[in-house]
Amino acid sequence: MQVLNELFEKNKNWVTKITDEDPQFFTQLAKDQKPEYLWIGCADSRVPPNLIVDLPPGEIFVHRNIANLVVHTDLNFLSVMQYAVDVLKVKHIVVCGHYGCGGVKAALGDHQYGLIDNWLRHIKDVYNRYVEEINSLQDEEAKFRLLCEKNVIEQVTNVCNTTIVQNTWKSGRELSVHGLIYDIADGMLKDLEVCTTGQEQIGSAYKMV
Ligand code: CO
């Protein structure tokens, strides 16, 4: 427990700060959650969702994994998304990647890291899909940044192709899926402008009636 003293101390100070500003904050928050956003982000410690968009607890429903991947057989992810969309009725799904992503860097290279290679393989598939465009760049950093972006764009597609999202669109409810990338070097978020809002925007092979 000794080593966690810092965390308990910080937690106490944080509660004091919040309740000084709004004595009802936790009482209200305990009643319900109505987040408008589902955030799919990287597990990287430098990309904490609520902090980088300056939103308090209760505003973002979050799923994080290595390299912000959306894998349609990942029961953990699917459960998070189905609950967020069907029960919480979020209005926006945000896939947020980041430059400098260790998972993306590993997928660009040829080293083995063990079990995780099977997870990173999903990023290798993205690399393979855009290999000519990425390898046409001379600068290694530029290649790395481009694959970070392509990875986000592919995950946005993966979100849209799920039956969960398609069924929501078919029901007539508004739901938009966005791809963003965060720069850990300056703290800025960038919109990759792949916002998808309806079934007509997805590939015909993935369309489900
Ligand atoms: Co990362």
Image (cartoon, rainbow, N blue to C red):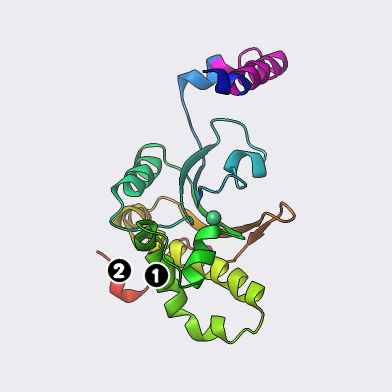
For the point 54% across and 71% down, the residue is 147
Looking at the image, tell me whether mark 1 or mark 2 is earlier in sequence order.
1
Identify the magenta region.
7-26
Residue that badge 2 annotates: 207
Asked whether 89 or 117 is in front, the reply is 117
Q: Mark 1 near ligand 1 (CB under 8 Å)?
A: no
For the point 29% across and 48% down, the residue is 75
Q: CA distance from mark 1 to mark 2?
A: 7 Å
Q: Residues within 10 Å of mark 2 (few under 14, many from 20)?
A: some
Q: Mark 1 near mark 2, Cβ–Cβ under 8 Å?
A: yes
Quarter holding the C terminus? bottom left
Residue that badge 1 annotates: 202
Ligand 1: which quarter? Answer: bottom right
Look at the picture and state if 179 lies above or below 77: below
Local secondary structure at mark 1: loop
Query: Magenta stretch: residue 20 in it?
Result: yes
Q: Which mark is residue 156?
A: none
Asked whether 41 or 163 is in front, the reply is 41
Question: Could you say which quadrant of the image residue 56 lies in?
Answer: top right
Q: Amino acid at mark 1?
A: Ile
